[in-house]
Image: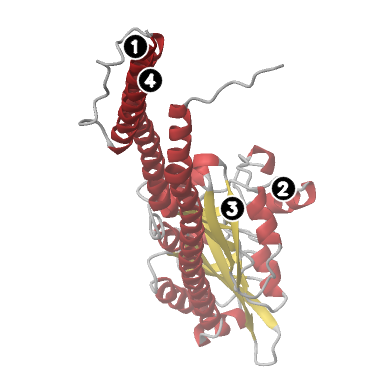
Amino acid sequence: MIRRPRIRFSQKVLAALLIVGVAPIALVSAVGIQGTRNDLTSLGVTNIRQRSTSTANAIDAYLQSRLGDIILVSKIPDVVRFSQNLSDQLNRAVARNALAAAAARAPEYESVAIVDPKGSIIAASVQSDEGTSVAFREYFLTAMKGTPYVSDPSYSVITNKPALFFSSPVKDPSGAVLAVVRTRVNLAAIWDIVEGDAGSVGQGAHSFLVDDYGIRLAVSETKGHRDQAESLIYKPIAPIDPDTAKKLAADKRFGTKTPDQLVIDPLPTLKSSLDGLAKGVSGDYAFAFGTGSDEQRGVVTRLVTKPWGYVLAVPLTTYTRAADNATFDAGLMLVMGILLSFVIGVVLTRSLVGPLRRLVGEATQVSTGDVDLREAHFDTKSGDDITHEVASAFDRMLNALRFYALADEAGSGGED
């Protein structure tokens, strides 16, 4: 017959303390902390979404404002008059003055110019720009078709620096396109907007602006590091297909760089989120990226003026730090509960089992005759309630044994 291992009394006490005292605390703490973590994450995403939408609207408003400026320039009488006769030198000088006045509207305006139908700059607020051909530029081709245009950032063939180009057709009274006016604007203002979100919604918050091809146009990391800006932007979030790469290279999007020289910083969840947002209408989408301690929550918001996406992301620990601290505290409390249960179990077991074992030993000595029955006794004046009751029971049993023993002796003496 196989004997089952006997469970010690101390083990039973410790198990009872753990089940009754520690296990419920651990379960409640785990459920409560996870619920808190989820609530904090939801609150964080809501906060990120509000800020992302606000900044995206600010960028949209900026682009609309600058596009409105160049549309106004296309309607200035001096500009229209010169565009009707591009060989008139007197009107050219007057047009230059009008362009210079328009360029003074904002510090980020680098140049305002008139482009003839062949794609050459014929008059500009910066006269050294004149004579440059921009016939390959999308902003020129689109405006010549009669539609105002906002370009993606691309390197200027004049300054070899990244810039935005706003263009608008110059039309005669009948609506025929005479020429194109364009503004070259550096990215300082947009970078200022994007950099303003660094740390805006919590520690580690960072932001960036991507175009429809997933190429970063501005990043908050340029804050205080504008000299490194060109090495931080133009990092695609996904590989660019060959046909698109050729188109971007033809438009001098990256200056002397070719698309295959760009450093890809993949964010597949962002790419899929951006692709899921409709173009031309405002919308946003929350996404997650990174793993473990590097996990982040972000929101991408689609702009209206351009099919760009503005992304604001924050490390998840920024919002769940309180829950993480609670997890540590709960773990510490759990360890302390286990230690206390062990200590209490040992103390309780010893205080109960020790005296009982002493009584058992004394009872064994009586039963084996090692102690004279008439002199044997158990201490009934000390110990806890249980020990006292057991000792009293043993004393009553001894009294009964003495009575029967004396009776037997008396009976034996009478027969002699």
Does residue 66 lie above or below 351 as drawn? below
User: Which of the two discs, 1 and 3, labels the residue nearer the N terminus?
Assistant: 3
User: Which of the two discs, 3 and 2, labels the residue nearer the N terminus?
Assistant: 2
Could you tell me residue 136's position as x and y percent?
69, 59
State the SS at label 4: helix
User: Which of the two discs, 3 and 4, labels the residue nearer the N terminus?
Assistant: 3
Q: Which residue is mark 2?
A: 240
- Under mark 2, the amino acid is Ile
Q: Which residue is mark 3?
A: 288
Does residue 209 lie above or below 183 as drawn? above
Q: Which residue is mark 4?
A: 360
User: Which of the two discs, 4 and 2, labels the residue nearer the N terminus?
Assistant: 2
Q: Is the residue under label 1 in contact with that under label 2 (CB below 8 Å)?
A: no
On the picture, is 246 further left or further right than 198?
right
Residue farthest along the left direction in this orientation: 381
Check disc 3: other Cα within 10 Å, few if <14, some if 14-19, many if 20+: some
